[in-house]
Image (cartoon, helix red, strand yellow):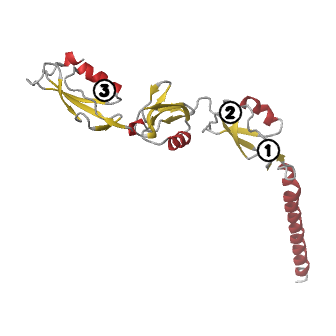
Amino acid sequence: MSDRPFTLYKFLKNIIIMLSIGVVAILFFFYIYLPATTNHNEAITVPDLLGKSFEDIDQFLTNRNLRYEVVTDSGYAENQPPQVILSQNPKTGMKVKEDRKIYLTLNATIPPQVRMPDLTNTDLLNAEDILETNGLKRGDLSYSPDRRVNAIIEQRMNGEKIEPGTLLYKGSIIDLVIGNGDGIKRFATPNFLLKSLEEVKFQIDASQLKLDDVNYIPNDTVPPNLVYKQLPPVGSIVRTGDLIEVWVNAEKPKENDLN
């Protein structure tokens, strides 16, 4: 019975000593050991990498105790050389720990491809906006007789007509053919009667009209191979680009003869 108070006292004393040691160990770990091993009080300022060549990055970051990784999706900037850095994460000036990885986006070596939009019948200002939105550039402008004023009649690249949906490299230059409004002008339909088809074709072209259907139907009221009927009739008011249909006193030629 006489030994119990002494044993309890000794037990409590040991518990207090163990708790004290534990508290000291925890404080040492969080306030001395951990900051020292993680460079808690040491921060590295992220350098500005934008515009730098990828070839120069490895040694540049290694000297500053930083690492890097190139993201899989490259960007593209036409005004920058290939393989230069377009973006970085973390950004310039941020404070990071030693050995932090910097994620880099590089400028693509080959421009990405885009599809050619359909600009036909679009006004010039809208067409320019569409080209810019799709990463394309407006090239030369040329004008063609057409009643549509400043409307796109044709889209071309390198002198060739370019169809909507065609894959092009971003930054490609697109030339535009625009209506000059001449189609608004009105005039009387010329007289094509009693003329050969070749004469009629020449006259239609000179009048900036377009030949539509040629009907080969024999007619005994006029000499052979001459035009005996036309639509619109002689003297009717037409506009540049309107269609002309004619009837010729002849049998319809065979396909080989038409070619």
Judge by depth and name the residue closer to the eye, 52 or 218. Answer: 218
Query: What crowding class fits label 3: few (fewer than 14 Cα within 10 Å), some (14-19), or many (20 or more)?
Result: many
Q: Please name the amino acid that badge 3 sits on.
A: Ile
Quarter of the figure with residue 82: top right
Q: Amino acid at mark 2?
A: Gln
Percent position (x, y) of residue 132? 56, 40
Examine the image and state in which quarter residue 19 appears: bottom right
Q: Nearer the viewer, residue 191 or 62?
A: 191
**Residue visible at 87% across and 66% down in the picture:** 18
Q: Is residue 65 visible?
A: yes
Name the residue type under label 1: Val
Q: Which residue is mark 3?
A: 204
Q: Image quadrant for the N terminus? A: bottom right
Say if 250 sits above or below 152 in the image.
Answer: above
Q: Which of marks 2 and 1 precedes in the sequence?
A: 1
Question: Which label sits on residue 80?
Answer: 2
Q: Are marks 1 and 2 in contact (CB under 8 Å)?
A: no
87 relative position to 198: left or right:
right
Query: Alpha carbon of mark 1 to alpha carbon of mark 3: how far?
Result: 73 Å
Mark closest to the chain's N terminus, 1 or 3: 1
Q: Is residue 165 visible?
A: no
